[in-house]
Every structure is written in C-alpha cells, then in structure tokens.
Image: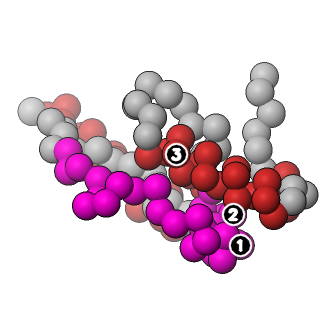
Amino acid sequence: MKRVFTVEDFDAISRSEKLEWLKNAQDAYYNTTDDVTPFIDDYTYDQIANKYPELITSIGSAIPDGGLPKIKHKKKLYSMDNVYTDEDLMKWVDKTIKLAKKLSSE
C-alpha cells in the first residue's frame, strides 16, 4: 500500500523542495484526466496551502489564463469538497438522502 503524504512530511522538506512539490501538485490537479488519481488529497493540499500561503503565492497559479473551461455535467455532482466539520458532513448526508429518495421515486 502506498504511503500517504502528510503535512508533517511537507514540513520536513526544504523550501526549494516545497516549491517543486507544490508545482507538481498543482500540475497534477489541473492537468490530469479524471481517471488519474492525484498524489495528494484535496484536504491535505488545503492544509498545506493554509499553512504556507506565501509559497502558494510565489509559485503562481496552475490555472490557465482565461480560467478553466466550464463543463456542463449531465447530472448534478454532489461533492464533499467543502465538508470540513461534523455539521458540514451531516448537512451533506441529509441532502444526499433527500436526493436519493427523490430519484428513487421517479
């Protein structure tokens, strides 16, 4: 099983390694296909970005000029991206259960 990269791992590397790692993480996030798993989860990246905002600022954005293309999904995606607390999780669960009931009755 592959070991998960942690904030503590990031803390332990040099500044130049941090910058290179962040560039690679951004590239993997914005420039890979859906079937490729990024080498770090969003939550851990967000923790690192919050702890080291000056590094994020110094490497710039990996988002292409003009922004990312807008994609219209056939069905609404119910992401857990913004679920950080127990309360957020319960709201997400309630919303998902309501949606499942609605879809099963159609």
Please name whichever residue, 60 or 10, is drawn nearer the observer in this view of the structure. Answer: 60
Please, what secondary structure does the residue beneath circle 1 have?
A: helix
Identify the residue shown where x is 53% and y is 41%: 28
Question: Is 88 positioned to the left or the right of 10 in the image?
Answer: left
In the rendered image, residue 63 lying in the magenta stretch gets the answer yes
Whether residue 103 is visible here, answered yes or no, is yes
Residue type indicated by callout 3:
Asp
Question: Is 13 positioned to the left or the right of 50 in the image?
Answer: right
Residue type indicated by callout 2:
Ile
Rounded to the nearest whole Å, what is the CA distance between mark 1 and mark 3? 20 Å
Identify the residue shown where x is 23% and y is 49%: 69
Q: Where does residue 67 sit, x and y in percent of width and height? A: 29, 59
Can you tell which of label 1 and label 3 is closer to the viewer? 3
Q: Which residue is mark 1?
A: 51
Residue type indicated by callout 1:
Lys
Q: Which residue is mark 2?
A: 48
| Of pointers 1 and 3, the one earlier in the residue sequence | 3
Q: Which residue is mark 3?
A: 27
Rounded to the nearest whole Å, what is the CA distance between mark 1 and mark 2? 5 Å
Residue 11 location, quadrant: bottom right
In the rendered image, residue 51 lying in the magenta stretch gets the answer yes
The boundaries of the magenta stretch are 44-71
Please name whichever residue, 43 or 55, is drawn nearer the observer in this view of the structure. Answer: 55
Q: Where does residue 25 sit, x and y in percent of width and height? A: 60, 48
Identify the residue shown where x is 35% and y is 55%: 64
Q: What is the residue that sits farthest to the bottom in this orientation? A: 54
Identify the residue shown where x is 87% and y is 56%: 13
